[in-house]
Amino acid sequence: MATCLYENEPVTIRKFKDTMYWSIDCQPVGQRLPVFSKNNEKGIGIIETLIDGYDIGKITVMKLNRKARRAIASTVKHDFESIDGGHRKRNLWDYLNNKFKVSGSFFSDLPIEEQNDFLDIELSFAIYNELDSETKGHIFRTLNKTTDVNFIEMLNSYGDTPIANFVRETVRSVSGIENEFHDLFKFNLSADEKKANYSYLSFDNNRLMQDHFLARIVHRYLVHSTELLGGSHDKELKIMYEDSDIDNKAISKIADNVYDHCEFLRKIAVYRKPRFGGKGLSQHDAKVLSYLYFYLQDTYDNFRIDDYEAFFLAYNKANQELKNQEGRFKKELVPGKSGYNVPTMYTKYIAAPWDTKKVKCATTYLIREMPDLESLIVIRDPRRNFSTVDREAKLSEQNFKCAIDGRKLNLQDAHAAHIVAHTNGGRTVYSNLAMVRAVYNKEMGSMDLNEYKASLLNKAA
């Protein structure tokens, strides 16, 4: 017979209130976030179940060893970490502290006798000794096989692993570490602190929807870096979360790409909000724009967007046209067996982020509706530096004179400058090369060479 790894301990609600709640970390990194329900139906249901004399299920916690407690001593000193039952513990605590009413009354409104009866109810605790992250996650997933736990909440239960930490810390503030999540996911709490109002997104992180969205983006950068446009199936996400070879070094290689991706979405949202009643990106918009951004990276590699408003307007026009069931695509059927017209295909395929063929098909139609796409971006040459052969040939062609001041210049004191600045889309080709004095090239920065020469003349005048 297997050895039991936990101890069963009955804990009265009184003991939970007076001593135990403060000793438990009720929201560790692998726990689900609070689930907001209309009028706090979930919390009320938990309390009503207790009042009616029914069991609310075993609450599972793990003892923290001294080293673990020291590691979080700068924030809150805990003796236990929650493995399962975080919602139950938090809702019970809120009820005891008069955060919501049950049957029209706060806890403090009850007669003293009823308060005492409630406080004497016993909760069932399963207490484990110290466990590693993999085992904690396994216990959580096993306990929740028959309960309403969605896929991304299962992945979040992997706890303190590099990939799980990167996703959650990019999307949200994690208790105890004071991380700075990306501004795309910025929000303000409502007056009752029960609803998050997001600044740039119109979908919230209830049930970790935003985590799931970002996990798919991370997966493309981490696993499909040579062909970003495509789908990310939940099976692939699970493999990614379970891959022990994905360490902090691997995460650091893609972190900037993921942040740039989020920043692209945030900047588009800035121009969407005033045109759509202050609403940020919908899930549909966030997915479409992500696919479009992947396409741009696959196609142009090195590019930038200077006018995000123009980019948004072009995207929005194409997107709205493709979704419009009464528009010019109304009668156009998509090739294949689906029988869908274009608007039906576009809407359904965008909503299938796990299917690469559907993602690519929908994105292709979007790109066709944006014929001026290249005019909305600045395409940079991936090669930035000129070869030694080109530099020597160009300096000889210039009779060893600086292209800016016309004075004598040798190779040792010369810099290879882009006539049209690289940052402005200038290519690293011989026809766009000029040899100039080093000091000029440094001062030019992102200016084109002729623009810089004109500024020097103005100064001299």
Image (spheres, rainbow, N blue to C red):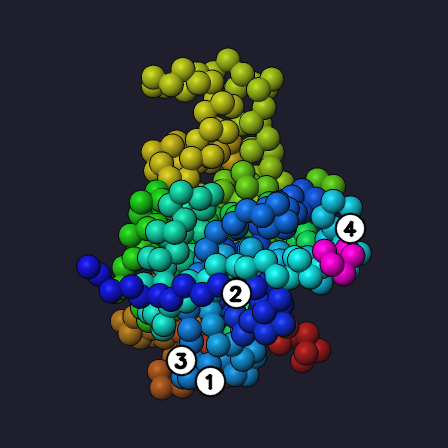
Look at discs 3 and 1 and give the one toward the viewer.
Answer: 3
Mark 4: amino acid: Ser
Q: Name the disc covering residue 65, or none.
A: 3
Q: Is residue 107 magenta?
A: no
Q: Residue at x 55, y 71 (%)?
A: 20
Look at discs 1 and 4 and give the one toward the viewer.
Answer: 4
Q: Which residue is mark 1?
A: 70
Look at discs 1 and 2 and give the one toward the viewer.
Answer: 2
Q: Residue at x 72, y 56 (%)?
A: 114
Instruction: Tell me the element at label 3.
Output: loop
Q: Quadrant of the C terminus?
A: bottom right
| Mark 1 nearby-residue class (10 Å; few <14, some 14–19, many ≥20) | some
Q: Residue at x 42, y 35 (%)?
A: 352
Question: In the image, is residue 447 above or below residue 307?
Answer: below
Q: CA distance from mark 3 to mark 4?
A: 40 Å
Q: Name the disc covering residue 222, or none.
A: none
Q: Nearer the viewer, residue 74 or 327?
A: 74
Q: Residue at x 48, y 59 (%)?
A: 124
| Mark 4 nearby-residue class (10 Å; few <14, some 14–19, many ≥20) | few
Q: Name the disc covering residue 11, or none.
A: 2
From the top left corner, tell me how far across and down residue 449 is, in percent: 52, 68
Task: Please report contact status of discs 3 and 1: CB closer than 8 Å, yes or no.
Answer: no
Q: CA distance from mark 3 to mark 1?
A: 9 Å
Q: Which residue is mark 4?
A: 105
Confirm whether residue 397 shows in the render.
no
Mark 2: amino acid: Val
Taking the view exactly as shown, the residue that stands out farthest to the top is 331
Left or right: 191 as drawn, with respect to 195? right
Q: CA distance from mark 4 to mark 2?
A: 25 Å
Confirm whether residue 460 shows in the render.
yes
Mark 1: amino acid: Arg
